[in-house]
């Protein structure tokens, strides 16, 4: 099957569909610069997108891979997870060949962003789709005259049939902040993480990849540039309180996020920073 890149309408959103080798596909919305779907060559959708997601920009789209910048969560006085999630990005470049399809979106500061965060920046997110993987690279350039620091994440919603049945390996021995238990700092002592209640953890300084074992669906997750990994599942009560998530939506995803939370990333004037997350079918 030939590779291709085409503009489509996705629930009323202007979106780009990448077709990669062996029939793998990815859909990216210009709203939020957000990967919304990744179907691997076995025909399986690997990302979770809430059936109650809002696509009019009034709320961040619940699912896929939201881009959280320049603030992670409520670690400051900006809207939760910053403002990029509800901004419209532009296509900067696209290219495809026999063994890949590549799309880069871009966005820059404007009056609205400077009213929230008084810095000049240009950001790009690049999606590289190959036969057995998708690679997301977030790049931010400080186009202003003074240094700035940010926190953020690629807030990836990995699809699960039943989240209680999955195991996440690779976080053993790491220190983490447990935001579901008074933000206390603990050390992970299990060989695998299982979800049996609300999970909201920031794992610091993670250098190893993770492996999501979900029955016969396994996925390798690794990141570069982003020092931390965030693991989140709202479980039952928090899911019921979320209007853009079905009551049982918690069962169908586990967020494994490439993140910069513990230490804000400093970008001197005129310099740029890259961070990436790679999802691999194993
Ligand atoms: O990444 C985990 C987290 O910070 C959770 O605390 C929860 O707030 C989640 O992100 C979703 O945030 P959102 O703003 O998308 O509802």
Image: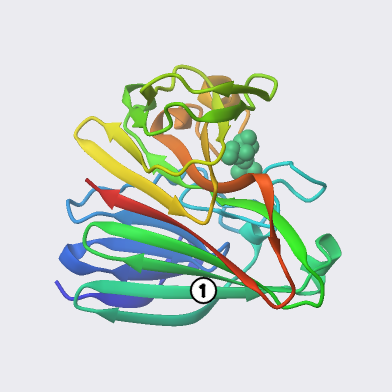
> What residue sits 24% from the left and 54% below the top?
40
> What residue sits 47% from the left and 29% below the top?
250
> What residue sits 17% from the left and 51% below the top?
42
Residue 225: image location, x then y, percent: 52, 56
Q: Please state, as top left, top right, bottom left or bottom right, where the C terminus lies in the image.
A: top left
> What residue sits 82% from the left and 60% below the top?
116
Left or right, 239 with respect to 46, comes to right
Q: Nearer the viewer, residue 224 or 22?
A: 224
Circle 1 SS class: strand
The answer to whether any part of residue 81 appears in the image is no
Q: Residues within 10 Å of mark 1 (few under 14, many from 20)?
A: many
Left or right, 149 with respect to 274, comes to right
Q: Please state, as top left, top right, bottom left or bottom right, where the N terminus lies in the image.
A: bottom left
Residue 206: image location, x then y, percent: 49, 41
Residue of label 1: 105
The colouring scheme, among rainbow, by chain, secondary structure or one colour, is rainbow
Q: Nearer the viewer, residue 175 or 106?
A: 175
Q: Nearer the viewer, residue 121 or 92?
A: 121
Residue 279: image location, x then y, percent: 34, 51
Left or right, 36 with respect to 166, comes to right
Residue 165: image location, x then y, percent: 32, 23
**Residue 166 against residue 12 in the figure, above or below:** above
**Residue 62 against residue 98 in the figure, above or below:** above
The answer to whether any part of residue 40 appears in the image is yes
Q: Quadrant of residue 242?
A: top right
Q: Whereabouts is ligand 1, in terms of quadrant?
A: top right
Report whether the residue tagged 1 is closer than 8 Å to ligand 1: no
**Residue 203 against residue 24 in the figure, above or below:** above
């Amino acid at each position: 099957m030939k590779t291709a890149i085409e503009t489509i309408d996705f629930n009323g959103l202007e979106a780009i569909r990448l077709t990669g080798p062996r029939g793998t596909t990815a859909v990216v919305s210009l709203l939020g610069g957000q990967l919304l779907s990744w179907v691997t060559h076995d025909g399986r959708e690997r990302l979770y997108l809430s059936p109650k997601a809002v696509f009019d920009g009034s709320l961040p789209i619940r699912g896929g891979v939201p881009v959280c910048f320049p603030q992670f969560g409520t670690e400051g006085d900006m809207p939760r997870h910053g403002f990029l999630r509800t901004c419209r990005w532009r296509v900067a470049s696209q290219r495809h060949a026999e063994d890949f399809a590549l799309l880069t979106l871009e966005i820059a500061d404007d009056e609205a962003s400077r009213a929230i965060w008084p810095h000049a920046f240009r950001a790009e997110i690049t999606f590289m789709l190959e036969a057995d993987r998708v690679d997301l690279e977030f790049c931010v350039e400080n186009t202003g005259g003074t240094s700035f620091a940010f926190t953020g994440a690629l807030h990836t919603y990995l699809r699960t049939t039943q989240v209680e049945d999955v195991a996440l390996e690779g976080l053993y021995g790491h220190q983490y902040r447990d935001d579901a238990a008074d933000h206390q700092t603990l050390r992970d002592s299990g060989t695998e993480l299982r979800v049996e209640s609300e999970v909201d953890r920031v794992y610091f300084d993670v250098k190893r990849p993770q492996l999501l074992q979900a029955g016969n669906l396994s996925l390798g997750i690794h990141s570069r540039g982003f020092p931390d990994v965030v693991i989140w599942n709202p479980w039952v009560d928090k899911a019921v309180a979320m209007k853009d998530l079905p009551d049982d939506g918690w069962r169908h995803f586990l967020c494994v996020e490439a993140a910069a939370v513990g230490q804000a990333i400093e970008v001197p004037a005129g310099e740029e920073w890259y961070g990436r997350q790679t999802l691999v079918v194993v």
